[in-house]
Amino acid sequence: MPNTPPSPRRRGTARTDALLQVTLELAAEVGYAGLSIEAIARRAEVGKHTIYRRWPSKAALLMDALHRVWTTDLDHRDTGDVHHDLREQFVRSAAALSEPPIGPVYRAVIAEAQSDPALRAALDERFLHTVEQRTLDRIALGQRTGELRADMDLTFATEILCGGLYYRHLLTTRPVDETAIDNLLDMFMRAYATDPPPPDRG
Amino acid sequence: MPNTPPSPRRRGTARTDALLQVTLELAAEVGYAGLSIEAIARRAEVGKHTIYRRWPSKAALLMDALHRVWTTDLDHRDTGDVHHDLREQFVRSAAALSEPPIGPVYRAVIAEAQSDPALRAALDERFLHTVEQRTLDRIALGQRTGELRADMDLTFATEILCGGLYYRHLLTTRPVDETAIDNLLDMFMRAYATDPPPPDRG
């Protein structure tokens, strides 16, 4: 690549990435309750007002930070086999949810959201909405190619796919392992796969 | 009924019921973190050791208290129509989960369980296990009568039925309403109902 200075837009993106990274690191160290915009600004060496111009609260900032890590790692593929692509993505999601940096911070955010409706709203709107959209796009594609039934409710099927294993993760001592993922996808495919399977796409 | 004094066993059950009731009341007032065996014993006018003889921790006692309210209200019926019976029970469960005495206490317990593995284990073993067993029994009956497919994994189908809407309840701002329950049951019945339907049982 030619050795030209980065564009202002690219410098802005790099600064945002650094700020979101600092936010996650600090959240992992001090927990959600101990997190503050002041401390994030200090560690990232930016002014508080620089942060407040873009994020109304630490909840919004942290959701964007989780979102950045998540969406970098967790794209859905399109191999033409919706069951395969969902499985691959869910196995990666489950690993991310149980490991740093997302795992412990995310668990703490969900806990805090039980007594903080504004945090729950930020979680829903700034994070889950985007995660769900990716799964919705993938199963909508499966509908268009004829792998999945046209009368499937996309929104609700997405919710069960994205949310179906949180019970296991948050309320039980059972692991979110590949068996659990396979069972969920088995129910989903039994309910919504077309039968007989459609002819080859190619 | 003849006016005889209650048996020792019945007096013991009444005392246990009163103690569990006090536990729930106090948890609703002070939250899980503020709850103590000492305070429960004081309000119930029993000795601390009376409680510790039967419950190893406040978590265990509170799970049994939730369990008592839950199981009093939330039996599954058997009308011969598994979809109907599940729907009726889930509509009642969803109401119970969003209202006192269970609603706020239960939400707080789940939050606390994110940083307290012993509480999560108590929640799983002393409460959810019994709730799940009732749903498992009802769908196992549906298998025996031929309404549901013999190759359904009972344990996992139960988990999705009992847990599938916790994501909505805990992580989003969407209500656990009858539409959500109907969507979950629609997926379940599409996946596991026998087709064609079995002949009448009678």
Image (tube, coloured by chain):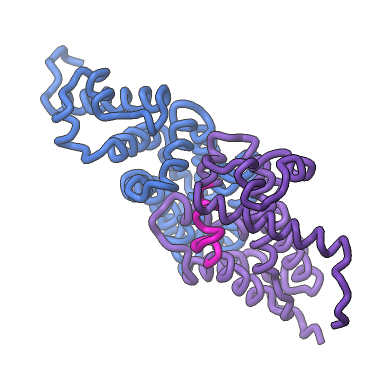
Chain colours: A purple, B blue
Give the main secondary structure of the magenta stretch: helix
Image quarter of the N terminus of chain B: top left
For image coordinates 48% across by 48% down, the residue present is B80
Q: Is residue B51 left or right of residue B147?
A: left
Measured as percent of width and height from the top left, residue B107 is found at 48, 37
Closest to the observer: B61 or B155? Answer: B61
Vertical relation: B76 (above or below) A129: above
Is residue A112 covered in magenta? no
Which residue is drawn at the image coordinates 44% and 47% (left, top)? Answer: B114
Q: What stretch is highlighted in magenta?
A: A95-108
Please name whichever residue, A60 or B35, is drawn nearer the observer in this view of the structure. Answer: A60
**Looking at the image, is B18 positioned above or below residue B124?**
above
Q: B64 or A37, which lies in front?
A: A37
Q: In which quarter of the image is residue A89?
A: bottom right
* Residue A83 drawn at (x, y percent): 64, 74
Instruction: Mark yes or no: residue B181 visible.
Output: no
Q: What residue appears at the point 21 percent right and 40 percent down from the top-left corner?
A: B56
The picture places residue B164, in percent across and down from the top left corner, at 55, 52
Estimate the x, y position of residue B176 in percent, counting from the top left. Answer: 60, 40
